[in-house]
Image (cartoon, grey):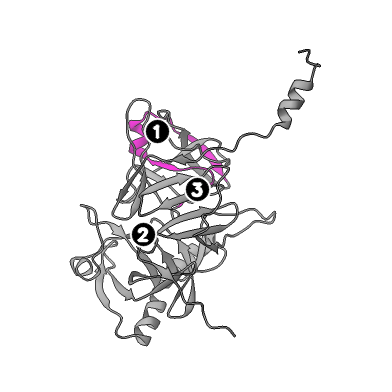
Amino acid sequence: MMMIPGLAATVLAAVPAAPAPAQVLPTAYEAGHFYAAPETVDGQRLRLVVDTGGGGAAGMYWLREDVAERLRLQPAACRIGGASLAVARLPAYRPGRGLPPPGPGPCGPAVMIQTGTDGISGDGQLGAGYLPGRVWTFDYPARRLVLEGGGWRPDPAAHATRLGFPHDGAGRQASGFARIVIRVDGRPLDMLLDTGATAHPTAAGRQASGTPVTAQGYGVTSYIATSVLERWHKAHPDWRVVNDGDDLRPRRPTRLIEVPRVEIAGWSVGPVWFTEQPDAAYRQFMAQWMDKPTDGAVGGNVFRHFSMTLDYPRETAYFRCVEGCAAATPPPGP
């Protein structure tokens, strides 16, 4: 067949690209936390906590400094605003055992190198800098983490709920921290959606709550501001409270409170234990990067009942009930 010069490119450009397929990430699941578990070409396996409430510069995930050294990544400086970040080229992963590349960001395709990390992060973190811009399914009962493909559609059995994000002057998401609304005791609460909300219950906290923990004593929880805990305790003195129930920060042990029912996305689950946090942690500190102040964070001890899909581009979450949940009773009308 004779091809007219220039027509081939035109014809090919007119054919729509096939939707990207879904990608099941190599994942470990431990005491309520998801860990991405990619493998490098030289056989090194990483363990990166997947934390929607964790930080990170736009477009990047981060690795611990000693891990970057072990992988022989060469650090370089990248300036964002007035800050200088240590970054490195992406590790080389085995085909089928890697991570989706980071999205666009001011430092290009790179990983952040982090110092002074906590005990729950493993080798690093996929956080609110890396996750946005795509659609992720956290299937808690199946312990699967999926980057959904271009043809993804919500499961008809899932309930949708809007997510709140701050936006810049051009209408773009200004941070990857998502706000979600739950209901407790008939009242709505604005909360950070936080797959990384971490518990370290004391012996008394473990005995009361039954929270599954790792060998190091870490588990998952949801957080609530002190003022809300006090309001709940005053209104419901029968709701169990454990003093010094969590020592994630040993110098400041905190209380736990058991809430009989929590409603999220039109589903009802419970009982749910909440760990106390100072009001300022969410109403001032986290509020800097959210669309409005929140009352705490909702975490894996609520999500464990669901296959939860976070559609960052459409700012919507979908919850499909898998176990231990029921349709919530609609609130009374005006």
Front residue of this view, candidates 327 and 193: 327
Query: Marks 2 and 1, Cα distance to the nearest angstrom?
Result: 25 Å
Residue with the mark numbered 1: 97
The three-letter amino acid code for the residue at tag 3 is Leu
Q: In this image, 5 relative to 39: left or right?
A: right
User: Residue 304 — which label?
Assistant: 2
Q: In this image, 299 relative to 134: left or right?
A: left
Q: Residue furthest top?
A: 2
Q: Secondary structure at mark 2?
A: loop
Q: Which quarter of the picture shows residue 205? A: bottom left
Taking the spot 57% from the left edge, 60% from the top edge, the residue there is: 165
The three-letter amino acid code for the residue at tag 1 is Arg
Query: Marks 3 and 2, Cα distance to the nearest angstrom?
Result: 20 Å
Crowd class of label 3 (few under 14; some 14 to 19; many from 20; radius 10 Å): many
Residue with the mark numbered 3: 131
- In magenta, the rendered stretch is 55-80
